[in-house]
Image: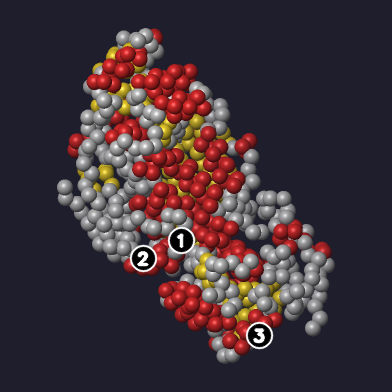
Amino acid sequence: MAFVTPSNSSCATLQIGKSVGNRIRANSRKSLVVMASTSVQSLDLVHVSKNIGIPVMVNGCTGKMGRAVLEAAISAGLEPVPVALGGAEDDGKILDIDGMQIEVQGTSQREDVLSSVFNDYPNLIVVDYTVPAAVNENAALYSKLGVPFVMGTTGGDRELLYKTVADSNVYAVISPQMGKQVVAFLAAMEIMAEQFPGAFSGYNLQVLESHQASKLDLSGTAKSVISCFQKLGVSFELDQVKQIRDPRLQVEMVGVPQEHLNGHAFHMYHLTSPDETVSFEFQHNVCGRSIYAEGTVDAILFLAKKVNSKAEKRIYDMIDVLREGNMR
Amino acid sequence: MTYVTRTPSNTSYANWQHRNNLHNPSSQFQIGKLVSTKSSNKIPNRRNFLISMTSTSVQSPELAPAVKPKNVGLPIMVNGCTGKMGRAVLEAAISVGLDPVPVALGRHGDAGKIVDVGGKQIEVQGPSQRESFLSSVFKEYPNLIVVDYTVPSSVNENAALYSKVGVPFVMGTTGGDRELLYKTVAASNGYAVISPQMGKQVVAFLAAMEIMAKQFPGAFSGYNLKVMESHQASKLDISGTSEAVISCFQKLGVSFELDQVEQIRDPKLQVEKVGVPEEHISGHAFHTYNLTSPDGTVSFKFEHNVCGRSIYAEGTVDAVLFLAKKVASNADKRIYDMIDVLREGNMR
C-alpha cells in the first residue's frame, strides 16, 4: 500500500500532527514538526517527536469522548490505526476524523481483528471509552491478547476488572477520572488531610457545585474533597452541598458559559474561620471534555513508556501518570 | 460524655474510593474518627463537643473518645505583650484556658508597665536582671512556656536567655540571625517551636501545594497563572507565602515571573475590587491564584484571605499547646516548626 508523506507546511499554528491520506503503516516517516503553542518549556522537538508513531486504537470512537480522544491524540502526534472496535450496531461505520478514516468493527470476530491489528502494530495502545456494560468483556479481550490499554470507561464490575487485568499481567492504566489536574488537586487535598488532621477544626464549609441538568447526583470528586475537609476537622454533611441545576442560575450566578451548559463540572469550596477573619476558597471548573481527552493522551504516553521500558508494575492509575511528570 | 454517631450510608461512594485507589503515601483513609469542637468565642469551660462520623466512611466506624479540657492551668509568659501581637496572643490564650503568669519581659522603656488583658494584669520587667528574674519565675511555674513576640533585634539575645535558663519557648518574632537562633537552641537542647508563619491553616495550604508540586512535577504544564495579592499599604514587598506558592506552580510546569504578580495597595481598590473589610485595610493579607488551561476550558482558583492577626494568635496558642505536650512527654526531638504542630492534629 502506498502512503503519503506530508510536507513540512502544516506546523504554522496549532494544527499539529496532521496526516494526509490513509496511513496504513505505523512506521511511516514524517517530516512533520510537532509544536505545542502552549508549551511552557522550550520547544522540545526531540522529546515530542518520539511520541509520533505510537499507534492507538480508540474503542468507542463513535461516541463523543472517543472522538475527543482521537482529536487530542492526533494533535499530540499519536497515530490512530484505521480500525476500531465498537458495539454491534456500529459495525461497518466509518469515522472521519482530521482527514483520517477509521472503520468500526462490530462484536463478531473482534478477537481476530484485534489480534491481527496488534500483529501489525506491536506498539499498539488501546483506549476504551465504551459503555459500563462492556467494561469487563472488553478488558477480558485486551487481557487475553495482551494488548496494553487505557480504560476510560467508568462502571462495570471494577473488582472483576482489576482481577482480570492482574491475572493476565497485561499493562493498563485504569482511571474513572481522567482529568489529570483535578486528580492532582484532589490528591493534594488528600495528602493535606492525612498529614494535618484537624487543622481546620471549627472552620465553616460551604460547597457549591454545578453540572449539566441531567446529572442528579453529587460528583465523586466533590465527595472526596468534602471527605478531606472532614478529616481536617470541618463539620459538614453531604446534604449541605448546594447543587445548582437551573441553567439560568448556572449562567448568571455560577458563570458557566452558555455553550457548556450541557457538559460542565464546576465546584467551589469555601472555608471560613470561627471568628470569620480568615477564609480559604478552592475552585475547579471544567467545561466540556477536553481535560479528559488530554488526560487520556497523557495516560497513553505514560503507558507506552512503561511498556517500552518493560516496567515491572502493570496496573496504573492517574496518580502514577502524574508522578511521571510532563511527557510532552 | 455522650456522643452522637451516625452509620455510613453512602456505599456507592465507598466503591468510588476503592476504584480510585489513590496510590499516594496517604492512601489509608482515616475515616470514622472525627472530633469536631465547635468553639465559641466564650471562655472555655463550656465548650460543646460534637463527635460525628463521616458519612463517607468505608470501614466500620471507630468512635473517638471525648476530648477533656486538660489545658486549663498551663502557665505562659508572653514577652512583648505591650505590642499588638503579644496582646492578641494573650487574649487567645486566656480564651482557651491557658494561664498567663502575672509578669513578662520587655524592653527598658516598658519596665514597670502593667498590661491589662482579659481581666488579668501583667507587670513588665525590664532588661536588668532578667536572667535571675526569669529563673525564679520558671522555678515557681515549672510547666512554664514562654512566647516571644518582641522585635527582630532581640531575637537572638532572647533565645540565648531562654536557652540558658532552660525554659521552653515559642518564637513568633521574625528576623534576627536565624542560623544563630537555631544554633543557640540546638546547643542548649531546649524545647522550642520556631516559625515565622504562625498562620497554621495557611501553612497547611502551602504545604499541600508543595507536596503537590513535588509529587506531580509538570502537572499543569501549559496552564496560565494570574496572581493577585493585597496587603496594608505599608507592606511594599510580595509576601513570602505568595513567593512560596508561586514557586510551587513553577514546579508544576507553569511559566510565571514574580513581577507578574498584581499587587493591590490602593485602599479604594482594596475595598471595592478585592473585598477587604474597611476595618482591616491597615492589616490584612489577601491572595488569589488563578490557573487556566491552554484552551481555556479548565480553571482552578485558590484563595487565602486573612484579616487582622487572629489567625496568628490562634496558631501561636496551638504551638504553645503542642510544645507543652512535647515537654510533658519528654520527647526526643527539641526544635519544632508549624508543620510539626499541624501533624499533631487538633489539640483543643
Q: Residue furthest bottom?
A: A108
Question: What residue is at 43 percent from the left and 31 percent from the top?
Answer: B194
Same chain, labels 1 and 3: no
Q: Chain of mark 2?
A: B
Is A195 above or below relative to B184? below
Q: Amino acid at mark 2?
A: Ala
Is A108 above or below relative to B124? below
**SS label for mark 3:** helix
Question: Which quarter of the figure has residue B5?
Answer: bottom left
Q: Position of residue B26 (x, y in %)?
A: 43, 55
Q: On residue B244, which mark appears?
A: none
Q: Quadrant of the N terminus of chain A?
A: bottom right
Question: What residue is at 25 percent from the left and 23 percent from the top?
Answer: B141
Q: Chain of mark 3?
A: A
Is B55 above or below relative to B164? below
Question: What residue is at 31 percent from the left and 23 percent from the top?
Answer: B77
For disc 2, the marked residue is B14
Q: Chain of mark 1?
A: B
Label 2, label 3: how many angstroms apart (C-alpha)? 40 Å
Q: Position of residue B94 (x, y in %)?
A: 26, 28
Q: Amino acid at mark 3?
A: Ser
For disc 3, the marked residue is A116
Q: Position of residue A198 (x, y in %)?
A: 34, 46
Pick the residue in front: A266 or B87.
Answer: B87
**SS label for mark 1:** loop
Circle 1 packing at 10 Å, graded few (<14), some (14-19), many (20+), is many
